[in-house]
Image (cartoon, rainbow, N blue to C red):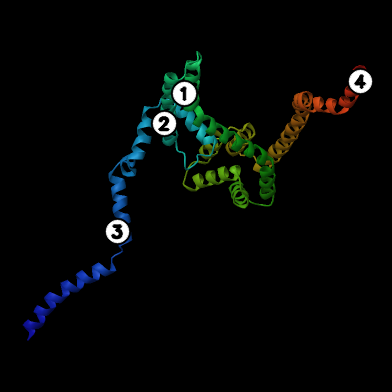
Amino acid sequence: MMIVWLAALAVTAPLGFIAWSTVAVDRRGAAAVKRNLATGTLSPAAAAGPRRNLWAMAGRLAPKSYAAKLDRLLAAAGRPRSMPLERLIGLKTLCGVGGVAFAFLHLFTATYPARFLVALAVTVLAYFVPDLLVRNTGQKRQQKIMDALPDTLDQLLISVEAGLGFEGAVSRVASKGGGPLNDELMRTLQELQMGRPRQEAYLDLATRNTVPELRSFIRAVVQADVYGIAIANVLRVQAKEMRLKRRQRAEEKAMKIPVKILFPLMFFILPVLFIIVLGPAVMGIINTFSR
């Protein structure tokens, strides 16, 4: 009888273990582990598919100096997730190929003498259109950072004078608002939390932005950290300076308004005004002398 029980246990135990492992296994987790292992074994370009291979190939073919310039433009634009450096270079390559194809088609179909210049201009414009778009996005973003900097410094000064440390004040200001400047401050805090040296994180914040006032503020903060100057005094001086510069920029824009409005006034407003005011008199004079 014992032999029968042992034989039944020897058969049912493995079957039960197999059934339990089949039912209880986390298939999604196992699939994720396999994907991670495959990603770690293969190169990122090979694991992402043929499209990523094309972007990576285009990135490798681009000159390093030009790639560094594009990288600075992307840094000023906030490094959009949809447009990394390799994809931007690949997009430029595709636009350039499209421009060359259009130029050849235009050369074979057009007959006017300036077709060569038009084909060349279209090719160059098609290749540099992504650069112009990224530069325009970066300029708008940097302008928003410049406009938000004085108010942000005032908030930092109030937080520091209330008893918070500088990083605590930066965290509070960055978490309570929105915009490019808050995103940059939050990224700097995340780098500090990851263990990056403080001066290096602050200098990187100044490097990836082109606002002179922000760079001046970062240099002042770094010097205060090096020489042990009270950060409240630095913030007070910087906030006062930023408010003064903002007022000067507003006055400068106000002084430029008469010059900017001069040509529309001369070519669009005054002619219509003269027609309305002097038109009936001129018509009356013409009718009087034509009798």
Q: Residue beneath label 4, please?
A: 285
Tags 3 and 1 touching, CB below 8 Å:
no
Tags 1 and 2 touching, CB below 8 Å:
no
Image-quadrant location for residue 17: bottom left
Residue 265 visible, this angle: yes
Q: Residue beneath label 3, please?
A: 30
Amino acid under label 2? Leu
Between marks 3 and 1 in the image, the one whose residue lies nearer the viewer? 1
Q: How far across and down, in percent of the image, does residue 88 sit?
A: 45, 34
Badge number at residue 14:
none
Q: Which of marks 1 and 2 is nearer the N terminus?
A: 2
Image-quadrant location for residue 3: bottom left
The quadrant of the picture occupied by the C terminus is: top right
Residue at image point 47% right, 42% down: 82
Between marks 4 and 2 in the image, the one whose residue lies nearer the viewer? 4
Between marks 2 and 3 in the image, the one whose residue lies nearer the viewer? 2
